Amino acid sequence: MTFDDGPEPNVTPQVSQALADAGLRATFFALGYKVAQYPELTRAICKAGHDMGIHTWDHPDLATLDSAGIRDQLQRTSDAIVAAGCPTPRLMRFPFGSYSDTALAVAAELDLQPIQWSDDSNDWRYAVDIGDGSAASAEVEKDLDNIIKAIDPQSRGAIVLQHDTYYSSIGTLQKQIDLAQDRGLDIVPVSQCV
């Protein structure tokens, strides 16, 4: 499980708590400006044992930036994560999954391992409160059910994209955990897979 675009004070603590209640850790790919805005929340995520990776400073398409712009996006975010009290990040995710050879080269220079996703929860398509029983809530749950049911327990698994900025992530999380564990799947941070 991976969570992008946070930390978000109205959602991230609940996601982190749900994971903690289940004895699980995940990977959070944070935006630097939010890390700088919420350093205590960032530190709490790291203290809970989750991976903290870079998702750039403010979510630009890195394929459109030159090397100096890419370096600034990644280094500023890394610096903010460290200033918040977390270990130096070694994982990063490209916004929109979009990158260039230049972006790959800069990531390598900064000793960052890019991590894409194999499956998209589509929670970003349904940015609504999951608790209201809306049709959108049902769609997010259906998408996640299909993803988890398609994972072969004997395979290398999946990296599922979610966001800790939408209430839909909170509302579906326990169901995802239960379904994955019922299928014999292990939920681990990305750092345990690379």
Image (cartoon, rainbow, N blue to C red):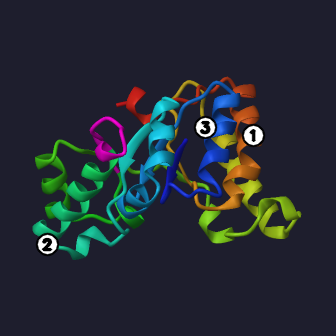
The image shows residue 27 at horizontal and vertical percentages of: 47, 40
Residue drawn at (59%, 60%), measured in percent from left and top? Answer: 165
Res 120 label = none
* Magenta-drawn segment: 82-92
Sequence-first tag of 3 and 1: 3
Residue drawn at (38%, 64%), measured in percent from left and top? Answer: 33
Tags 1 and 2 touching, CB below 8 Å: no
Res 151 label = 3
The image shows residue 161 at horizontal and vertical percentages of: 53, 52
Sequence-first tag of 3 and 2: 2
Within 10 Å of disc 1 (Cα), the crowding (few <14, some 14-19, many 20+) is: some
Residue position for label 2: 66
Sequence-first tag of 1 and 2: 2
The image shows residue 51 at horizontal and vertical percentages of: 43, 36
Instruction: Identify the image quadrant of residue 122.
Output: bottom right
Label 3 is placed on what type of residue? Answer: Ile
Please tell me whether mark 3 or mark 2 is closer to you in this view: 2
